[in-house]
Image (spheres, rainbow, N blue to C red):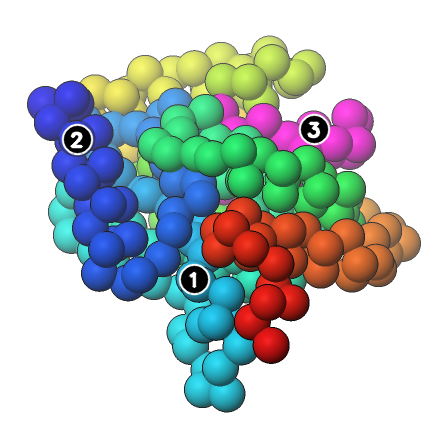
């Protein structure tokens, strides 16, 4: 079944390129499968970065900068235009850094490798910390206040908090996989409950409800409050420069078109 799904994803990416007249530079898994904590019925969250032709970026008429291709019980496929992607890298968008470091890559190109080499310097500890603690807080308040909860939501709150912990100690982009984040030093009672939660989740459906685990719940409450305070106190460390992004965008256009952008005028 897995081989069939991978072939289907590859076919869908090719279909998108032909239908939308774009070039997909990079495509990855972004959800629970990339994190290594999928359930038996988890879907495939495919995210991709694409480019249009050079002349499409020079039109008066604005084009959508996202492609939302498919959403069903098996596949969730959507992508971002490269111009949007570079603007989001400038903002320190943590989600983009996750895509760029996904352990499951469906498609990549030399163009993308060079783009990401340029964009690595735009990682912002403050922006990432704010994103991750905010994700954890939202998940906790919406889904983890009852006596019985979905353990899938535990991971959706725990994982960003562990990412915050990694950023705080290592000052770099956190790993995507949940098991790599768990290699950090953690209280023994917390680690024991996480191991048990993962064991139960792996054998359950996405919608199954389970009792709260006290050590996990307290850890989430404490860390959400701590990182909310820390993220507000941190200085803005985003890279203000646009020149590197402008240059890599023009270089990418030249690679796609095989001639200088100047030849269009």
Relative horizontal placement of residue 265, taking residue 213 as reference (left or right): right
Q: Quadrant of residue 43?
A: top left
**Label 1, label 2: how far apart the Cα atoms are:** 24 Å
Whole-Å distance between the Cαs marked 2 and 3? 35 Å
Q: Which residue is mark 1?
A: 52
- Label 2: which secondary element: helix
Who is closer to the viewer here, 43 or 9? Answer: 9
Report x, y in % for residue 260.
61, 58
- How would you rate the neighbour count of disc 3 (Cα within 10 Å): few for under 14, some for 14-19, many for 20 or more? many
At horizontal 71% and vertical 42% (from top left) the residue drawn is 118
Looking at the rendered structure, which numbered label has been put on residue 7? 2
Around disc 1, counting alpha carbons within 10 Å, would you say few (fewer than 14), some (14 to 19), or many (20 or more)? many
On residue 166, the disc is 3
Asked whether disc 1 touches disc 3, contact meaning CB atoms under 8 Å apart, the reply is no
Quadrant location of the N terminus?
top left
At x 54%, y 40%, the residue is 112
Main SS, magenta region, reads: helix
Q: Would residue 63 appear left or right of 172 to someone viewing this image?
A: left
Q: Which contiguous range is marked in magenta?
A: 157-177
Between disc 1 and disc 3, whose residue precedes?
1
């Amino acid at each position: 079944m897995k081989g069939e799904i991978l072939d289907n994803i590859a076919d869908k990416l090719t279909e998108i390129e032909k239908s939308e007249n774009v070039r997909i530079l990079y495509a990855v898994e972004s959800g629970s499968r990339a994190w290594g904590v999928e359930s038996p019925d988890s879907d495939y969250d495919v995210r991709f970065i694409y480019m249009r032709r050079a002349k499409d970026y020079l039109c008066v008429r604005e084009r959508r900068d996202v492609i939302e291709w498919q959403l069903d019980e098996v596949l969730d496929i959507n992508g971002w235009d490269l111009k949007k992607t570079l603007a989001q890298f400038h903002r320190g968008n943590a989600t983009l850094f996750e895509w760029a470091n996904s352990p499951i890559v469906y498609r990549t190109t030399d163009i993308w490798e060079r783009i990401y080499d340029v964009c690595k310097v735009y990682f912002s500890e403050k922006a990432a910390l704010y994103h991750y603690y905010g994700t954890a807080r939202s998940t906790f308040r919406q889904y983890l206040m009852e006596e019985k909860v979905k353990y899938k939501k535990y991971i959706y709150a725990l994982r960003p908090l562990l990412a915050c912990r990694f950023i705080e100690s290592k000052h770099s982009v956190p790993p995507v996989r949940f098991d790599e984040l768990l290699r950090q030093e953690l209280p023994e009672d917390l680690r024991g409950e996480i191991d048990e939660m993962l064991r139960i989740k792996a054998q359950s459906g996405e919608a199954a409800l389970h009792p709260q685990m006290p050590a996990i719940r307290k850890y989430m409450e404490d860390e959400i409050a701590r990182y909310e305070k820390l993220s507000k106190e941190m200085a803005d460390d985003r890279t203000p420069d646009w020149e590197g992004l402008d240059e890599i965008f023009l270089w990418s256009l030249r690679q796609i078109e095989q001639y200088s952008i100047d030849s269009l005028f």
